[in-house]
Image (spheres, rainbow, N blue to C red):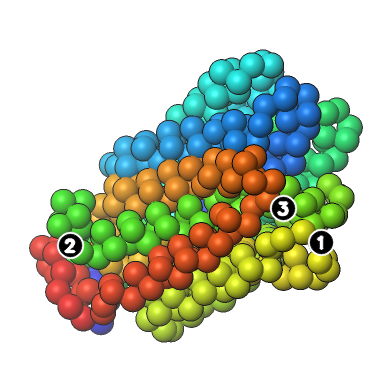
Amino acid sequence: MPHAAGSAPAGSSEFKLGGRVLAAALLGTACGASPLPFNVLPLVMGPIHDEFGWDFAAISVGMTIFGTTASLLAPVIGGLADRVGVRLIGLWSLFAFAMVFAAFYFVPGNIGGWYAFWLLLGVIGIGSTPVTWSRAVSMWFAKNRGLALGIMLIGTSLAALVVPQIANWAIRTGGWRFAFPIVALLPLLVALPVAIAWFREPKPEEAPAETRMADGNVAGLTLGQAIRGYRFWMLIGSIILISIAYGGAHIHMAQIVKLHGFTPATAASVLGVVAMGILAGRVLVGLLFDRIWAPGVAFASMLLPAIACTLLMGTGGALSVVMTGAFLLGFAAGAESDVIAFLTARYFGMRHYGRIYGMLYMPFGIGSGVSPILYGAVRDRTGSYDAMLMAAIFMFAIGGAMLLSLGRYPRLGETGGHRPA
C-alpha cells in the first residue's frame, strides 16, 4: 500500500517513533485498574474471610461490582478518548485509581462498605485500563501492531510477577489493609511520571499510513456499522465465554493452590507462574498475529487452558503439575487480551476504536467480574473448584472456536466502511 502524504513509513521505524509511547502504555497497563485488583484480592481474600467471616462468594462480589461497573462505562470512556484524546483520560484516570485503591485501607467491617469501595473503584478506574492505552499504541503501530500490543500488555504480566510479592510483604508487615496503599504507590510513583513525560497520540505526519484513508482521515467503522456485522457479535460471544472461564480461576488461584496442600507463600509463587504464562501469551501471540491469521492463532491458544483446568482439579499432586496448569491458564489470559485489542483495530479500524473496543471490553469485564462469584459459589457448596473447572474446559474450547468464523481481514474503504481483503 502506498504511504499517504505526510505519513510515517511502517516497519521497524514504528518502534523508533512510538517506542516511548509504548513504554508509557506498558507501565500504565501494569499499574492500572486492569491487573492490580486481580493480583491483590487473591492474597487478601483469606485474611478477610478469617477476620469478618464473609464467605468466598460474598467477598468475590466486590470484584464483580468493580468489573461490571467499569465495563459498563468502558464505551463511554472509550468514546471520550476518541474525542478528547487518550492522554487526558489516561493520566487523570491513573491518578484517581491510585487514590481510591489506597483508600481501601479504610474499608469498614461490613459487607456493604466493601461493595461500595469496589463500586467507586469501577467508576474511576476504567480509564487506566487498555481501553485507553491500546488506542494510542494502535495509532502508532500498524505493521507491528500485534507485537506492540503484546508488549504493552506485558504490563499485566509484570504486575502479576511483582504485585503479589509486594502485597504478601505488606500483609505480613501490617495486615491485609496495608497491602492496598502500598500497591497504590506503583501507579503514583512509577507509571504516572512516565506517562506524563511520554504518553500521547501521534501527530498526522507521525501516524502509519495504514491507520488513515486516502483523504487523510482516520480509517475505520462507526460503532453503528460495527454492530450491524456478524463479526462484532461473534467476538462478544467468544469474549463472554473465555472471560467467565478465566477470571475466577485467577482470583481463586491462591485458594486452588492451598487445596492442593501448599502454603500461602507457595500460592504467591504460583501466581508468579501465571504471570509468566501471561507474558509468554502476550509476546508469542502478538508476534504470530502480525504474521498469521489471528483468529486461527487465538483458537489454538484457547485449547491450552482447557488442558490447564484438568491439571488444577482435585487435591494433592505435585507442585510441578499445579505450576504447569497455572502457566497454561496464564497463557490464555495473555492471548485473550491481545485478541480483543488486535481484532478491534484489524476488523473495525481506528476511526471509533475507543467506543468499539469499549463495547467489546464490556463483556470481558462483566464476565471476569461474574466469574469469581461462580468459582466462589462452587467452592462454598462443594468444598472444591472441580465442577467450575470442568465447565471452564468447554467454555475455553467453544469461545476459541467462535473466532474461526470471523473470516478474512476487511480492507477499509474511503468512506470508513470496509470490503473483504
The residue to which callout 1 is attached is 316
Q: Position of residue 107 (x, y in %)?
A: 66, 20
User: SS class of the residue under badge 2?
Assistant: loop
Question: Looking at the image, can residue 392 be seen?
Answer: yes
Return the residue nearer the eye: 74 or 238. Answer: 238
Q: Where is residue 275 in the image (x, y as percent from the top left)?
A: 68, 60
Quote the CA–CA distance across marks 2 and 1: 48 Å
Q: Tell me which residue sits at (26%, 59%) in the image.
A: 233
Which amino acid lies under the numbered mark 1 shown in the image of this protein?
Gly
Quote the CA–CA distance across marks 3 and 1: 11 Å
Which quadrant does the C terminus fall into? bottom left
Name the front one of labels 3 and 1. Answer: 1
The residue to which callout 3 is attached is 256
The residue to which callout 2 is attached is 229
Q: Where is residue 181 in the image (x, y as percent from the top left)?
A: 72, 29
Which quadrant does the N terminus fall into? bottom left
CB contact under 8 Å: marks 2 and 1 = no
